């Protein structure tokens, strides 16, 4: 278990066990990213150490009151394995760039606590560190001594009292009032399979102000800390006292209220999936508690859990889960940015302009509101002459039903387009050559830490050699990775990995180019070393542009641009350190030969934008992906073909493409707004056709919305052009004016008989020829009027005729006004001339 402390919203850990060793000097922290492009992502970062500290585990660390100095007390120390030796103490300046651990030496022959494990070191409000209990290095005994270390005088003082019990594996938490609360732990001497556990009902408190112990009984692990309120102690995890197969690990979180010394269990619907013991706890944000590392009830890959604490009530807190859920949760918590002054001013000006335009339109069309009831009536009720009322009522009922069904289908189609699932189509094109993937080799079980001076085989160092089937050497593209920057972890890791990365340039292809040149059709990697050594090789393939190792190790070995986003890179880094291998990862053992086939495709993902719901020119995110097939063979069967290489070879890997094709997998929305509108238009046409079939066709106006709703000069220009083009006939406009004044009210014409009393000619004329002509003209007028009436009712939309009639009337009114003005002017001139003449006569 590592030493743990919190500083500046970071959870720091130092040392601890690693796969190949019981101790280490790894110094790292977990925090939330504050960068704009990756805000809210979880970061694992190694702290730079110019002079690395000791390799240790089961250590403890605190941050001093200057708030920048870390104080480390070693537990199991590689340099000291004797129980009689004193704990080693180190300091580290957290504010320095590239700091170093510096060992603190106390006075010669001064007493101090012996090396131990499972102890606690707690910084009290007086600025001193208190060390209590623990077990011996060989786990043969436990301690009951209490020591205080003064960072100012660099001295240890033994505060042990005779009444103190032996205790290890316990928790210790400092309160603001100077008291240190000790909970749980064990008192056994490691002699049996069942440990003697200390009841949670027993709370031991050491008061640093009076140097006295306080014991609380019946107060109604090992991750622990005091909460943000400085009065609630959080205790997580732990295990029972059994050291056999009956060991049980706990994943519960308990709260101890130090005001009333009462325990309560935090009940959450989605608690941690794994129980753990010896975990590290700390706040990575004001309300985010991280629980990481420790020993698990199961070899877990998800080694971090995060708890969100509400401000008002801890018991309404929620477990977020692992890092993969953190980003979306933190983004929900981010406060919405307030609008700046320019944005507010722009919105205000836009609102004023919009209100002004709307008000102007209302003012200009206010007079039309007087006719609004009639307009609505005429729009709804369209009974045609000669039809009974029941036909119009039937039409309205059917139209209402069709309108309801149409609107329901329209809403359904739009919602279907907005919630449309995504499907994909695959396009394949035959080519003569394909790109080569990046390949990472991580070898476990061999000491390959020596930095190679060249890529040529050296019998004293293990190498990975690369060559194509045409003889082209590609070993120069193999780079040894610095695992101190990033150490990959695998599910069944057996030791520390030494990793190599094969990252070829963009010009290296397999197949034949257009000019017939070929680098080869296969890549062959050989692992050079002792055939008797048992090793495990993890081989992972990455498509070009999607190799995160390039960024994490800061390599510049390839000219292929990296296409991964920061979020994808952070997620990969977390998975890679948690044992969650990439899909194209294969395991090879000593004296095995692996044959891998690969296929690279361009997966075009639809971006999460509203535009892609429309269905026109969608926005895609191009992501190269790779799929693989593999076959394992016994290397001894193919060893003979590698006899040209010097030295021993304990395995090989052959890589070649499945097929020489370019594959594009393109995502598409199953429903978009455009294709939904197509089906909506089909439904609308069907309904209109059914209504026309049931109730007959009704003619539509030749004018559209632009002509019908134009105002001002635009409206006047339409009328002026109609008058100019059609008023030259000097006759009343058909369908608007009757053929004769007798037909002003056509519906009242009875049986087509001529009303002799309304004829505008002399009744006393006796000429039979003239009367016959008059009768014939009357019959023709009636026939023409009937024809126009039928056309107007069933075939012709008379809107354009009405507009022409209105334009002619306006023109006549203007002309009459001009004539009156001219006549008045002429009369005035005549009167003036008469007055002048009369004056001359006088």
Image: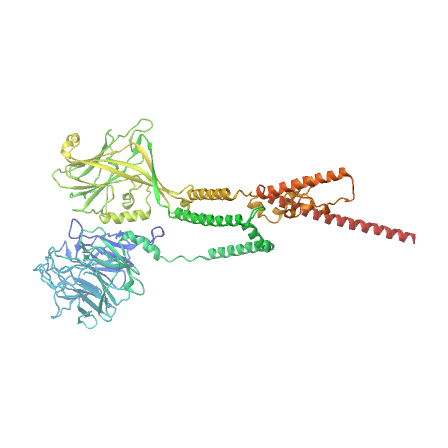
Tell me residue 676's x, y (percent).
42, 44
Residue lying farthest to the top in this orientation: 516
Q: Is residue 386 left or right of residue 199?
A: right
Residue lying farthest to the right in this orientation: 842
Q: Quadrant of residue 468?
A: top left
Nearer to the camera, 808 or 608: 808
Q: Quadrant of residue 57?
A: bottom left
Residue lying farthest to the left in this orientation: 191
Q: Is residue 704 left or right of residue 82?
A: right
Q: Residue at x 70, y 48 (%)?
A: 814
Nearer to the camera, 564 or 57: 564
Rendered image coloring scheme: rainbow
Nearer to the camera, 664 or 750: 750
Tell me residue 650's x, y (percent).
15, 37
Task: Give the quarter of the figure containing the C terminus.
Answer: bottom right
Position of residue 717 relative to residue 13, above or below, is: above
Tell me residue 49's x, y (percent).
24, 52
Task: Give the quarter of the figure containing the N terminus.
Answer: bottom left
Q: Is residue 350 left or right of residue 473?
A: right
Position of residue 280 relative to residue 536, above or below, is: below
Q: Quadrant of residue 503?
A: top left
Looking at the image, can residue 423 be seen? yes
């Amino acid at each position: 278990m590592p030493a743990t402390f919190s500083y500046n919203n970071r959870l720091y850990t130092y040392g601890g066990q690693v796969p190949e060793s019981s101790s280490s000097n790894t110094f790292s922290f977990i925090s939330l990213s504050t960068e704009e492009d990756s805000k809210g992502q979880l970061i694992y970062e190694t702290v730079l150490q110019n002079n690395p500290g000791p390799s240790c585990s089961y250590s403890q660390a605190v941050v001093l009151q200057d708030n920048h100095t870390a104080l480390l007390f070693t537990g199991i120390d590689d340099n000291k394995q004797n129980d009689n030796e004193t704990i080693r103490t180190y300091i580290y300046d957290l504010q320095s760039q590239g700091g170093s651990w510096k060992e603190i030496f106390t006075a010669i022959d001064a007493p101090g606590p012996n090396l131990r494990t499972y102890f606690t070191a707690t910084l009290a409000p007086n600025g001193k560190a208190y060390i209590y209990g623990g077990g011996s290095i060989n786990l043969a005994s436990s301690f009951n001594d209490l020591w205080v270390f003064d960072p100012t005088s660099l001295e240890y003082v033994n505060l042990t009292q005779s009444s103190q019990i032996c205790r290890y594996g316990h928790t210790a938490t400092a309160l603001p009032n100077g008291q240190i609360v000790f909970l749980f732990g064990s008192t056994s001497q490691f002699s049996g399979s069942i440990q003697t556990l200390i009841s949670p009902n027993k709370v031991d408190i050491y008061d640093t102000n009076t140097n006295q112990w306080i014991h609380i009984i019946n107060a109604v692990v090992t991750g622990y800390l005091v909460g943000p309120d400085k009065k609630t102690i959080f205790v997580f995890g732990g295990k029972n006292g059994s050291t056999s197969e009956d060991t049980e690990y706990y994943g519960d979180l308990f709260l101890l209220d130090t005001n009333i010394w009462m325990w309560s269990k935090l009940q959450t619907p989605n608690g941690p999936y794994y129980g753990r013991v010896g975990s590290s706890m700390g706040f990575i944000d004001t309300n985010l508690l991280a629980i990481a590392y420790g020993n698990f009830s199961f070899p877990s890959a998800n080694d971090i859990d995060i708890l969100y604490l509400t401000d008002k009530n801890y018991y309404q807190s929620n477990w977020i889960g692992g890092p993969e859920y953190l980003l979306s949760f933190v983004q929900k918590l981010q406060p919405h940015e307030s609008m700046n002054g320019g944005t507010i001013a722009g919105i205000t000006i836009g609102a004023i302009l919009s209100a002004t335009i709307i008000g102007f339109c209302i003012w200009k069309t206010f007079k039309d509101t007087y006719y609004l009831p009639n307009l609505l009536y005429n729009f709804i009720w369209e009974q045609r002459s000669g039809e009974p009322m029941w036909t119009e009522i039937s039409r309205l009922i059917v139209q209402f039903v069709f309108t309801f069904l149409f609107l329901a289908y329209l809403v359904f189609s739009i919602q279907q387009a907005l919630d449309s699932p995504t499907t994909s189509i695959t396009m394949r094109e035959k080519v003569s050559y394909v790109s080569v993937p990046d390949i990472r080799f991580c070898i476990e079980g061999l000491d390959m830490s020596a930095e190679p001076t060249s890529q040529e085989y050296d019998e004293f160092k293990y190498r990975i050699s690369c060559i194509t089937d045409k003889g082209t050497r590609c070993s120069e593209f193999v780079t040894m990775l610095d695992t101190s920057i990033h150490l990959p972890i695998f599910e069944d890791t057996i030791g520390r990995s030494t990793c190599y990365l094969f990252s070829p340039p963009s010009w290296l292809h397999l197949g034949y180019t257009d000019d017939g040149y070929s680098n080869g059709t296969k890549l062959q990697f050989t692992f050079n070393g002792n055939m008797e050594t048992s090793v495990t090789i993890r081989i992972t393939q990455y498509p070009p542009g999607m190799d995160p190792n390039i960024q994490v190790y800061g390599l510049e070995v390839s000219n292929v641009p990296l296409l991964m986003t920061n979020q994808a890179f952070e997620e990969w880094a977390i998975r890679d350190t948690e044992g969650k291998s990439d899909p194209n990862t294969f395991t090879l053992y000593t004296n095995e030969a692996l044959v891998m086939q690969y296929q690279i495709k361009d997966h075009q993902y639809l971006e999460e934008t509203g535009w892609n719901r429309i269905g026109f020119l969608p926005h895609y995110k191009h992501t190269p992906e790779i799929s693989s097939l593999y076959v394992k063979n016994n290397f001894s069967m193919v060893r003979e073909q590698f006899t040209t290489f010097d030295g021993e070879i304990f395995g090989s890997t052959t890589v070649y493409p499945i097929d020489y094709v370019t594959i594009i997998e393109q995502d598409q929305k199953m429903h978009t707004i455009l294709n939904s509108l197509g089906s909506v238009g089909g439904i609308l046409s069907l309904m209109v056709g059914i209504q026309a079939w049931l109730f007959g066709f009704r003619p539509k106006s030749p004018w559209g919305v632009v002509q019908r709703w134009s105002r001002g000069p635009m409206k006047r220009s339409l009328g002026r052009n109609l008058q100019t083009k059609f008023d030259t006939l000097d006759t009343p406009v058909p369908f608007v004016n009757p053929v004769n004044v007798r037909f002003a009210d056509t519906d009242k014409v009875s049986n087509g008989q001529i009303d002799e009393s309304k004829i505008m000619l002399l009744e006393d004329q006796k000429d039979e020829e003239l009367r016959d002509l008059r009768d014939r003209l009357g019959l023709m007028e009636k026939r023409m009027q009937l024809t126009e009436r039928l056309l107007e009712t069933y075939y012709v939309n008379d809107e354009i005729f009405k507009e022409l009639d209105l334009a002619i009337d306006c023109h006549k009114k203007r002309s009459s006004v001009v004539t009156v003005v001219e006549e008045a002017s002429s009369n005035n001139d005549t009167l003036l001339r008469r007055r002048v003449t009369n004056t001359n006569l006088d």
